[in-house]
């Protein structure tokens, strides 16, 4: 698959891409709504030199202290912090307090700690981490106070001991034991006083170096979630579209028919939803210029080239029911009749006749079934007069119908009667074109039995509905039965016509003629348009011509030609140019031609 083909597939299956994209965006929206917002705030603190040393040794002098940074996440620190903010201690477990030890200060050997805490909002996270720092600072201050109290107790103890030992030495200067004890007491007293002095001079055990900032959002941001959903939705949608296209076995258009089946594509017929809403099942009966009408006429022209010039018989069948074979048969027969040919439309679908939908009661009653049953009972084919007597005239000149008739014994057995060929031969002699509407050809033999007596069969398939495999099987089945398959018609195509053709499929020639006639009527003086005058005759002829263009029934070609000639004669007799309104005798020939070209250009613009 080339890049251009891939783009074409994506464009054709844009609904899948959009659907997947909407689903991914919906999932992203649900995720964003259901996720709990989490904000994290952090601060950096530095322990004093005394506290840093105590965190390693666990002692200050002779006092045992707890300066371990792990205490930051313990209940003695987090609990009071939660209480300070008015939160319960159980809620403190959601704070997610953590700490990270940084490199010690090279000058003071002080320990650097980064403390973080979570919150439901940026402000809450900031308040929580500040509360934890304050609580930890209070905890360390309490440890220092306890260590100082213990050292003061040592001072009191060793002061009393030193006094005792000093009295012993004074009483007996030669008492070496007393002298030694006195020296130890004085040394211990000095150490205790030194420790107290260090505690007093150390200052606060914790100082904030980087204040806590408002918490940062830690979840997935809405922008990132939407962008990821868009990217994932586009990738998934495009992938699903390409995969579904690979496994889609439905017919996509007339361009692939010949490759699949080996028979030519006779064209595409557009899907006209407005016609379906109106219930206008015979669009070729009117003069509305639509792509569907032009497609039917193009199909008629193509078949005229493929079929014999006189007494042609063609069978219209389809791959499956509902492909539009009866619609095409009816409109194709009518299109032929509008060209002045004598046409017979045969209801060859004995199982499920549908021609009455298009022609009403004319397509009902006795017909092909009764002719075949009579021939089977008598053993003699019906005469041409009997066949002609079964034909029913329609309101459209040149078009007659041979109805399907009543319910047959068995359609396949009835169509296998030898008299079928004689009946079709009689129909050949009675008209110029015979169009037979037959049942679908995939699973029924009726189409092959009918097409065996014809000049060829046309197979109808529906775009985006008919499976390629079934289309191929149907063509091979017909060819296997010795049937001449003239080609395949792709029905219900959604291919759009170029925008440049809107002037042809929009306002028709009749609209332009009506506008021109109205302009000529306004430009003509009232005094000169007296009844019976040449100008009045010309205007009346133009109005008749326009009215005939809008006749929704059959248009007699000869009558239209006669009206046109009458109009031209009237215009010529009056010497008035049909575009400009000036006298032909007063305008030189080159200028008249220039005026006609200008009028044509204006018509094209309309």
Image: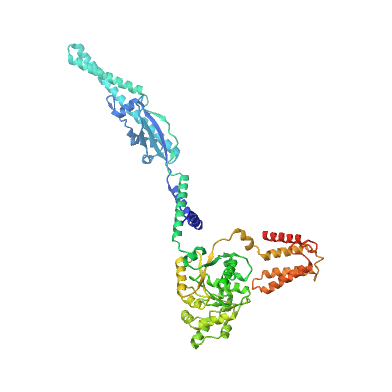
Residue 377 drawn above or below residue 356: below
Q: Is 565 above or below relative to 424?
A: above
Way the structure is coloured: rainbow
Q: Where residue 124 sits: x, y (%)?
A: 43, 38
The mark tally for this picture is 0
Task: Report the residue at 53% width, 70% height from top.
Answer: 324
Residue reaching furthest to the front: 590
Percent position (x, y) of residue 548? 68, 70
Question: Which of the pair 465/304 is nearer the observer?
Answer: 304
Residue at image point 50% right, 55% down: 4
- Which residue is found at the position 22% from the left and 14% from the top? 166
The percent coordinates of residue 118 (x first, y second) are: 40, 39
Between 353 and 588, the one nearer to me in the picture:
588
The answer to whether any part of residue 68 appears in the image is: yes
Is 159 situated left or right of 204 in this image? left
The residue nearer to you, when weighing 27 against 542, is: 542
Indicate the quadrant containing the C terminus: top left, top right, bottom left or bottom right.
bottom right
- Compared with residue 73, is residue 389 higher up or lower down, i.e. above or below? below
View extreme (bottom): residue: 378
On screen, residue 78 versus residue 555, left or right, reads: left
Q: Quadrant of residue 202?
A: top left
Q: Is residue 604 left or right of residue 228?
A: right
Q: Which residue is painted at 28% across and 20% down in the image?
A: 191
Q: Quadrant of residue 63?
A: top left
Q: Is residue 367 visible?
A: no
Residue 297: x percent and y percent? 59, 69
The image quarter containing residue 158 is top left
Instruction: Tell which residue pokes out farthest to the right in this image.
Output: 527
């Amino acid at each position: 698959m080339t890049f251009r083909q891939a783009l074409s597939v994506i464009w054709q299956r844009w609904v899948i891409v959009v659907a997947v994209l909407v689903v991914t965006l919906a999932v992203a929206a649900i995720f964003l709504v259901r996720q709990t917002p989490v904000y994290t705030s952090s601060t950096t603190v530095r322990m004093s030199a005394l506290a840093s040393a105590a965190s390693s040794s666990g002692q200050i002098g002779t006092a045992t202290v707890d300066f371990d940074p792990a205490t930051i996440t313990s209940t003695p620190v987090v609990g009071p912090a939660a209480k300070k903010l008015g939160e319960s201690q159980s809620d403190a477990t959601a704070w997610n307090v953590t700490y990270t030890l940084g490199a010690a200060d090279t000058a003071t050997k002080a320990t650097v700690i980064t403390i973080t805490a979570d919150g439901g909002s940026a402000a809450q996270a900031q308040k929580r981490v500040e509360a934890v720092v304050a609580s930890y600072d209070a905890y360390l201050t309490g440890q220092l106070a306890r260590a100082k109290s213990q050292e003061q107790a040592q001072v009191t103890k060793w002061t009393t001991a030193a006094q005792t030992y000093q009295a012993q030495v004074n009483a007996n200067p030669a008492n070496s034991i007393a002298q030694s004890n006195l020296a130890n007491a004085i040394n211990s007293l000095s150490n205790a006083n030194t420790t107290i002095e260090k505690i007093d001079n150390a200052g606060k055990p914790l100082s904030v170096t980087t204040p806590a900032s408002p918490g940062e959002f830690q979840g997935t941001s809405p922008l990132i979630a939407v962008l990821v959903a868009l990217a994932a939705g586009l990738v998934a949608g495009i992938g699903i579209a390409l995969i579904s296209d690979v496994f889609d076995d439905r017919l996509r258009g007339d361009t692939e028919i010949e490759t699949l089946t080996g028979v030519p594509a006779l064209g595409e017929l557009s899907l006209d939803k407005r016609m379906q809403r109106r219930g206008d099942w015979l669009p070729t009966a009117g003069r509305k210029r639509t792509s569907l009408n032009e497609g039917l006429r193009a199909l008629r022209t193509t078949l005229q080239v493929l079929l014999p010039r006189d007494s042609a018989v063609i069978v219209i069948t389809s791959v499956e029911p509902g492909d539009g074979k009866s619609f095409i048969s009816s409109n194709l027969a009518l299109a032929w009749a509008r060209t002045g040919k004598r046409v017979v439309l045969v209801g060859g679908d004995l199982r499920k006749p549908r021609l009455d939908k298009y022609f009403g009661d004319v397509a009902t009653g006795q017909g092909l079934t009764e002719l075949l049953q009579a021939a089977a009972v008598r053993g003699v084919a019906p005469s041409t007069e009997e066949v002609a007597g079964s034909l029913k005239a329609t309101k459209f000149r040149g078009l007659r119908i041979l109805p399907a008739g009543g319910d047959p014994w068995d359609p396949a057995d009835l169509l296998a009667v030898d008299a079928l060929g004689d009946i079709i031969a009689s129909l050949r002699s009675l008209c110029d074109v015979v169009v037979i509407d037959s049942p679908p050809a995939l699973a029924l033999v009726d189409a092959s039995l009918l097409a065996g007596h014809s000049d060829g069969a046309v197979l109808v398939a529906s775009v985006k509905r008919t499976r390629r495999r079934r289309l191929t099987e149907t063509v091979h089945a017909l060819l296997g039965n010795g049937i001449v398959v003239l080609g395949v018609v792709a029905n219900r195509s959604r291919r759009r016509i170029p925008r440049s053709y809107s002037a042809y499929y929009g306002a028709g020639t009749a609209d332009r003629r009506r506008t021109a006639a109205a302009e000529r009527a306004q430009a003509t003086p009232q005094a000169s348009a007296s009844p019976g005058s040449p100008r009045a005759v010309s205007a009346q002829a133009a109005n008749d011509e326009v009215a005939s263009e809008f006749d929704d029934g059959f248009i007699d070609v000869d009558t239209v030609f006669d009206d046109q000639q009458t109009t031209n004669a009237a215009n010529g007799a009056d010497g008035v140019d049909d575009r400009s309104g000036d006298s032909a005798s007063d305008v030189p020939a080159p200028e008249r031609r220039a005026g006609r070209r200008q009028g044509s250009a204006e018509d094209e613009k309309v």
